[in-house]
Image: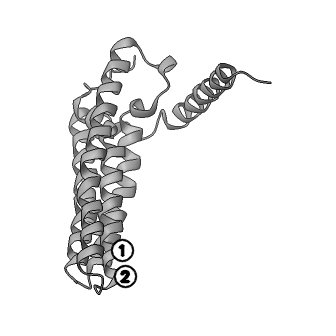
Amino acid sequence: MTSPSGIFDRYQNYRVRRWLIQEERSAGMLTSWRPLRRRRLLAVAVATALLGIAAAGVLSAMGLRMAPTIALAALLLFLPSWTMLRIASGGQDHAPDQMLDELEIAERNKARSVGLALTQSLTVPPLAYLIVVSAIAPEADAYRTAYAGGLLMMAALMAGGCAPAIILGWTRPDPEPES
């Protein structure tokens, strides 16, 4: 029987190997997006897309038929900007501890803490919306209520999940020039 610590160690080793492979693949990608100013543009694009998804949820709750189109447009902005931000910031938000120095670990952990707090606080309004609407207005359009609540919840969860990369992409200094 394998001990829990043995399983954990094997998983950590697997994460390190997987991260190194991914780092090697993306090392030469998006070099022009790695400076602080460009990473901040990506962070703004990600935040704008998340706000667009949340706005589509609110508009859906109010009965606007264009809400799914707005949500789709926001998702089409989110996917490339999020991917680019993670590549441009070097994947520091999800790097294994073994790949970071003490300062980077502290910065990453602070950013993750903010992400968790953001997730917890942003999920309350969509949950309250779903509970209140289903309790007070059971005759309300179930599809619209579920879709609006789902979009709001998705925006909240994605905002919390993206927060570490956004924070690190916004605050980390420019990478050292390669010699």
* Residue 30 shows in the view: no
Where is residue 20 shown, x and y percent of the image? 57, 28
Closest to the observer, 156 or 84: 156
Does the residue at mark 2 contact the one at mark 1 (Cβ under 8 Å)? yes
Where is residue 21 shown, x and y percent of the image? 60, 32
Q: Please give the label number shown on residue 123.
A: none
What secondary structure is found at the residue carrying circle 1?
helix
Task: Name the residue: 44% across, 18% down.
Answer: 100
Q: Mark 2 sits on what residue?
A: 143
Task: Name the residue: 36% across, 49% down.
Answer: 82
Question: Looking at numbered disc 1 in the image, what kind of residue is underneath it?
Answer: Ala
Q: Residues within 10 Å of mark 1 (few under 14, many from 20)?
A: some
Closest to the observer, 112 or 49: 112
Q: Mark 1 sits on what residue?
A: 146
| Quarter residue 1 falls in | top right
| Quarter residue 67 falls in | bottom left
Where is residue 53 shown, x and y percent of the image? 28, 64
